[in-house]
Image (tube, rainbow, N blue to C red):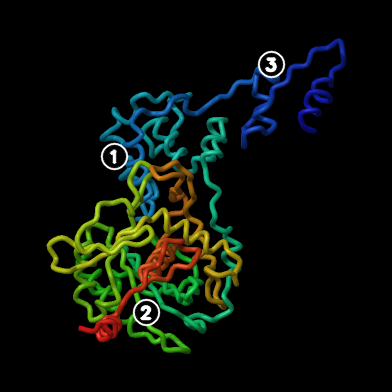
Amino acid sequence: ETRIRLLMGAVMGLCGPTQKLAIVMPLTVIVPGDVADRILDTNKYPEWNGERTKLLYQFPENMDLWDKYAEIKAQAYREGDKDAKAATRFYRKHRKEMDKGAVVAWKYRYNDEELSAIQHAMNLYYKDEAAFWAEYQNEPKDEHLAETPMPTRDELVRRHTGLIRGLVPRGVRALTAFIDVHNAAFYWMVVAWLEDATGYVIDYDTYPRQSLEYFTLPRIPKTLQNLYPGMTLQGRVYRALVDLFKELFSTKWPPTGAMIDRCLVDAGWGLVTDVVHRACSETEYGAVVMPSYGRYVTPKQRRIEDWSRKPGDQRGFGWLIRNRTGTGGDRYVLYDANKWKSIMANKLSLPWGEKGALAFFSGKDHRLLADHLTSEYVKRAEGTAGPMDEWKLRPGNPDDHWLDCLAGCCVAASTLDIHGDAFSRQERRKVYTADDLKRRISRVKI
């Protein structure tokens, strides 16, 4: 109100009563109802002749193809392609369909690596939707965006458990791990859980381990290619999994000597899916390790809980364990990646000391981990079963691998029946062992 009064009174009256003053005011609307938004409203302030210029006056009709384009672009960034050439190739192939219906303000506004102003506008849209609507459309849409529950980078860096690296807390219920598989290196993490689902991140790293404190996957110094020279992609991924399994699963974590109870391995990369399943089924630690798939469940899709049941399915909150067809008992975990990232973020937002909170070991600079954990943002959408969160990668932050690891460790804990209020409020059923059944049978009088 103060700024509006200043504009309407002091500024517009500068030249005196007998003179006319021409005023031009470039504006960007940041949030609905701010000064810029109100001045541009010709119903409230017609004398300003406000005009909302836009980068994109009409969106393309085929948004499904553009969503696919955005997925290809994000994957290209993860793999070190700065210009996302794979996404541009996809756009070139489908350009006629993707451009249909779109209207841009200036057809020559695009970068050298882009093919059109429409592609440029859509790149900005997928980079940060909230910023796009505010900075380029002058129509902020913050009511459609969920406030991310993830703490800030600085808050995460300072979030310590008080225990040093590798030390298990008293009263530990289980240890879970997750391995994120990539061409150049694996990312992994181990979390210790209490019965109330309080989580202690006791270790995380890459395989092979790096000597630098700060690095990105596209420029990672020590790679699987260095460790296993001359081997094919499938060969070195298999060897690396076998060696990392031995390292992780044979470790007895002090002071209790606890060992990993459940490890999930990312099997979603199609080039090595069969290799991951083979490594998990052939290892001597087969009772501990399982392939896993994080499914990006969109608002238009059915929740995993609503999927049709198949023989042998084991179901939980946002996950299921299922038999792989034609493998004779090879089992894997499917989970809702959006749901579990939100659960993880909520646990990180709880003050340390609250039941169900998550924090990291002390004595290490967690800046790189914090960058991974804040590499995605949340968009609130209306799904088939009500409001839901969609997690989207920020193209400028290609590394989100420990984010995937931490969410995967939470899923693994849930498969072990470690829930707590921070996980879900689903009813927990007692699991009967063979000894329980024997005792019950012995009490039956015939």
Mark 1 sits on what residue? Answer: 90
Q: Decide if residue 442 is on the left or right side of residue 54.
A: left
Label 1 is placed on what type of residue?
Phe
Q: Reading the chain from its start, which is encountered first: label 2 or label 3?
A: 3
Q: Please tell me which residue is depicted at 57% across the width and 75% down the height of the picture.
A: 161
Badge nearest the viewer, 1 or 3: 3
Q: Please tell me which residue is depicted at 35% across the width and 37% down the height of the picture.
A: 66
Mark 2 sits on what residue? Answer: 260
Q: Reading the chain from its start, which is encountered first: label 1 or label 2?
A: 1
Q: CA distance from mark 1 to mark 3?
A: 45 Å
Q: Please tell me which residue is depicted at 42% across the width and 36% down the height of the picture.
A: 122
Residue sitting nearer the eye, 284 or 381 = 381
Q: Residues within 10 Å of mark 2 (few under 14, many from 20)?
A: many
Q: Decide if residue 42 is on the left or right side of residue 382.
A: right
* Quadrant containing the N terminus in the rendered view: top right
138 to 339, vertically: above or below: above
Q: Can you tell which mark lies on residue 250?
A: none
Label 3 is placed on what type of residue?
Pro
Q: Can you tell which mark lies on residue 46?
A: 3
Q: Residues within 10 Å of mark 1 (few under 14, many from 20)?
A: some
The answer to whether mark 2 and mark 3 are in CB contact below 8 A is no
Residue at the far top in the pictured view? 18
* Quadrant containing the C terminus in the rendered view: bottom left
Q: CA distance from mark 2 to mark 3?
A: 68 Å
Q: CA distance from mark 1 to mark 2?
A: 42 Å
